[in-house]
């Protein structure tokens, strides 16, 4: 049996244990979010359906053998644009899983600039739905406009509220209500997608992802109050699901001050 790796952390809100490109792209006012040029849209469609989708399917179903629980929820989810909040615990699975889980809907992943900063691959990730977070006021306006457009086109917007990657982490890290403001702003249904790591009958790793929802907005509350209420509700559901993890590949230990 492989020895469990230990990672020490100090700040669960801001520390990241994922790979980061040397040169990060600045997501400022000149960043192009909208991709409605006819040739760009054709490129996006062809590469998403004929390159990303097969790769994602092979990784998700054949290599990682990820099982999606509560598939019956997909029936209603297909009828409209929705926001899905997920825990961030595996670079490849978090990128390739959603396009397979929610097929045939187009999936957009809200990311940081690292996902669009690599040469060539960065352009492909944009074609495949990566929507990097803005870094100034002008970019923020364009980000929100594009976010709304993709919801209107009945897309699935996937947000990782933990923001940072902790590989194989089996709990749910604390996160703020900020990303839940999009659900309130655009008045859409929300779902939770929780990745768990479990032991099979032979003691080997079995990955199960739980889909929960829809979570609806509370009437009579301000947008901020709705975002906070939604954050609390989804956080509790994700914590409950995370307790189903029984396989610990990496142990995370908080440093003593």
Image (cartoon, helix red, strand yellow):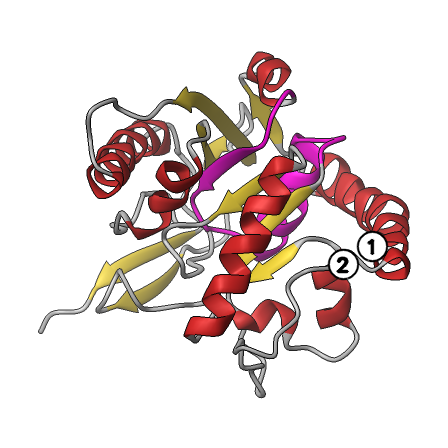
Rendered image: mark on residue 127 = 2
Q: Position of residue 135 (x, y in %)?
A: 44, 74
Crowding at dot 2, Cα within 10 Å, few <14 / some 14-19 / many 20+, comes out as: many
Asked if residue 18 can be seen in this view, the reply is no
Exactly how many numbered labels are in the figure? 2
Residue 61, magenta (yes or no): no
Quadrant for residue 191, please give it: top left
Residue at the spot x=65%, y=32% of the render?
154
- Up-down: is 102 above or below 93? above
- Between the residue at mark 1 and the residue at mark 2, the CA separation in whole angstroms equals 5 Å
> The residue tagged with tag 1: helix, strand or loop?
helix
Residue at the spot x=27%, y=67% of the render?
9
Circle 1 is placed at which residue position? Answer: 44
Question: Is residue 68 found left or right of 167 in the rendered image?
Answer: right
Q: Are marks 1 and 2 in contact (CB under 8 Å)?
A: yes
Crowding at dot 1, Cα within 10 Å, few <14 / some 14-19 / many 20+, comes out as: many
Q: Position of residue 141 (x, y in %)?
A: 48, 63
Quadrant for residue 41, please give it: bottom right
Q: Which circle's residue, 1 or 2, is located before the other in the chain? A: 1
Residue at the spot x=25%, y=51% of the render?
176
Q: Residue furthest bottom?
A: 23
Q: Position of residue 129 (x, y in %)?
A: 68, 53
Rendered image: mark on residue 227 = none
Residue at the spot x=44%, y=56% of the render?
3
Q: Position of residue 33 (x, y in %)?
A: 64, 64
Range shown magenta: 79-105
């Amino acid at each position: 049996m492989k020895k469990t790796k230990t990672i020490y952390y100090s700040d669960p809100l801001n520390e990241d244990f994922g790979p980061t490109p040397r040169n990060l792209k600045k997501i400022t006012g000149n960043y192009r979010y909208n991709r409605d040029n006819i040739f760009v849209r054709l490129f996006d469609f062809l590469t998403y359906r004929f390159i990303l989708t097969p790769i994602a399917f092979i990784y998700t179903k054949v290599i990682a053998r990820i099982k999606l629980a509560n598939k019956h929820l997909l029936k209603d989810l297909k009828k409209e644009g929705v926001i899905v909040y997920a825990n961030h615990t595996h670079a490849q699975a978090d990128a390739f899983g959603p396009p397979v889980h929610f097929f045939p809907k187009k999936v957009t992943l809200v990311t940081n600039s690292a996902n669009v900063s690599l040469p060539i691959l960065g352009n492909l990730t944009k074609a495949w739905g990566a929507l990097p977070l803005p870094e100034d006021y002008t970019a923020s306006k364009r980000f929100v406009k594009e976010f709304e457009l993709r919801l209107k086109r009945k897309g699935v917007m996937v947000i990782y509220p933990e923001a940072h990657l902790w590989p194989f982490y089996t709990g749910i890290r604390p996160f703020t209500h900020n990303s839940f403001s999009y659900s309130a702003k655009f008045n859409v249904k929300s779902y939770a997608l929780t990745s768990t790591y479990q032991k099979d009958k032979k003691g080997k790793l079995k990955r199960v992802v739980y889909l929960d929802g829809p979570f609806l907005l509370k009437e009579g509350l301000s947008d901020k109050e709705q975002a906070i209420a939604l954050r609390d509700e989804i956080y509790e559901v994700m914590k409950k699901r995370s307790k189903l993890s029984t396989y610990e590949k990496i142990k995370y230990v908080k440093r003593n001050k």
